[in-house]
Image (cartoon, helix red, strand yellow):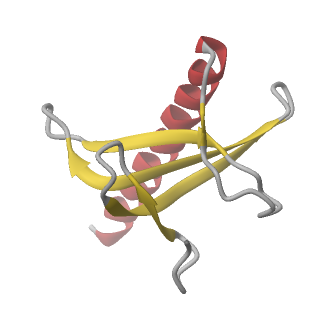
Amino acid sequence: MQSENKNIFTMKNDKGETVECEVLMTIDSEEFGKHYLVYTDHQIDENGSIQTYAGIYDPTGKSLNIDPVTTEEEWDMIESVLASAQKQVLKEQMEENQEAA
């Protein structure tokens, strides 16, 4: 089920509890012919980082399922895209800080 904010959705976790999640990004992979949803439930892991998840989704909306990523190659691609996005955000933050100084 999706809320009015298109970046927020609810789903059941592995305990059967309904949790609110935020979409961080989507990835369309021509290599794998799949569409990936990267999201978080804003829970903090044991290292103090926000937990992030990824799954395969249907961008047409015909299926509301988020299917698991099953191959190491897919995870490598997702992690590479996330690392690249994180570097871009950090670069933009540094530029903003330099402009403000």
The residue nearer to you, when weighing 63 against 48, is 63
* Count of all numbered marks drawn on residues in the image: 0
Q: x and y percent of residue 36 in the render?
A: 66, 42
Residue 83 falls left or right of residue 33: left
Which of these two is toward me, 56 or 91? 56
Q: Residue furthest bottom?
A: 4
Is the residue 8 above or below the residue 80 in the image? below
**In which quadrant of the rendered image does the C terminus lie?**
bottom left
Q: Name the outermost residue toward the front.
A: 16
Residue 92 horizontal side relative to residue 93, left or right: right
Quadrant of the snapshot with the N terminus: bottom right
Name the outermost residue toward the top: 72
Q: Tell whether 20 sits left or right of 5.
A: left
Up/down of 101 relative to 89, above or below? below
At x 81%, y 26%, the residue is: 32
Q: Position of residue 48 (x, y in %)?
A: 14, 39
What residue sits 44% from the left and 41% below the top?
Answer: 53
The image quarter containing residue 14 is top left
* Residue nearest the observer in this picture, 99 or 77: 77
Q: Relative to 4, is 86 above or below? A: above
Q: Name the residue nearer the viewer: 70 or 5.
A: 70
Is residue 29 rendered to the left or right of residue 49? right
Q: Residue at x 61, y 21 (%)?
A: 70
Task: Choose top left, top right, bottom left or bottom right for residue 93.
Answer: bottom left
